[in-house]
Amino acid sequence: MKKLQISLIILIIMNVIALIYLLVVPKIETLTYDQYVSDHWQEDRVKVLGEEKIAEEEKEQQELQDLYQVKIENETELLSNYTGELLTSTATNKIRELVKSGFEKFYTDTKGMNVLQIEQYFNNNKDDIAMQTGLTTVDDFENFINKIQIYKNNIEYTKVEIEENSFVYEEEYSHFKIKITYNNGSILEFTVYMGNKDFMDTPLVIIR
């Protein structure tokens, strides 16, 4: 009987100690890996990359999302026919960039310029023009500027498409036709030349 009483006293004491521990000692938060990533991912990115770099990355991601809102119809014309070394997105993204803002920018930049002024603009911006359009001669650029005069009507595109059966393979550059329709019925048509090899000293994609 005495042993039973001692056991009961010990059990009561242990329960009291456990209760005190639960009340006094703060709980240690345990997180799963997914919870940790969710709670601390952004904080850790800031520590490693810095706020400026993160803001730059987020801006690039947003620009990319905006870019892909420009839908190009009949992309299979390019995907199923092009056999060169470039990614087809090299051409389609350049088209998207021009449709989204490039055409209007070049029109705005050269608005009201005469031939000599356009030539001077070309000479001052050769690298940017080559990067955005692949055009490397002033004559090609002048023809390009003449095509985009429709922007004087402040219009928006409604449809972008690669013309069916327009793909042609040639040894250095394959090419296909692109058509952009605008909400006032105007149409811009370009031939897109896509290099078959990734030459560093040659424009990869030319739009003219």
Image (cartoon, grey):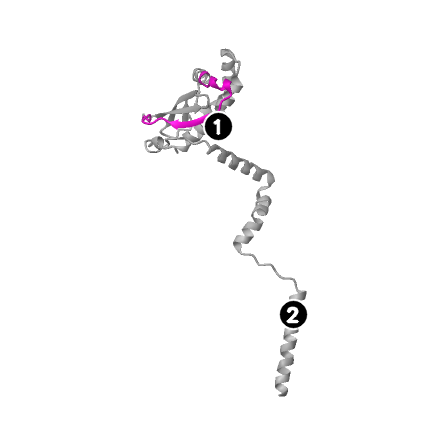
Indicate left or right for 16 with 153 as reference.
right
Q: Quadrant of the N terminus?
A: bottom right
Name the quadrant containing residue 136: top left
Q: Which residue is mark 2?
A: 19
Please tell me the numbered disc located at residue 50.
Answer: none
From the viewer's side, name the closer residue of 101 and 133. Answer: 101
Amino acid carrying mark 2 in the image: Leu
Residue 137 pos. (x, y %) = 44, 18
Residue 206 pos. (x, y %) = 41, 24
Q: Which residues are magenta?
A: 146-168
The alpha-carbon separation of the residues under discs 1 and 2 comes to: 67 Å
Amino acid carrying mark 1 in the image: Lys
- Quick check: is 19 in the magenta stretch? no
- Quick check: is 163 in the magenta stretch? yes
Q: Quadrant of the C terminus?
A: top left
Q: Which residue is mark 1?
A: 100
The answer to whether one can see residue 127 in this image is no
Q: Residue at x 55, y 35 (%)?
A: 59
- Crowdedness near tag 1: few (<14), some (14–19) or many (≥20) residues, C-alpha within 10 Å: some
Residue 180 pos. (x, y %) = 42, 24
From the viewer's side, name the closer residue of 155 and 92. Answer: 155
The answer to whether one can see residue 47 in this image is yes
Q: 124 above or below 23?
A: above
Q: 119 above or below 173?
A: above
Looking at the image, tell me whether mark 1 or mark 2 is earlier in sequence order: 2
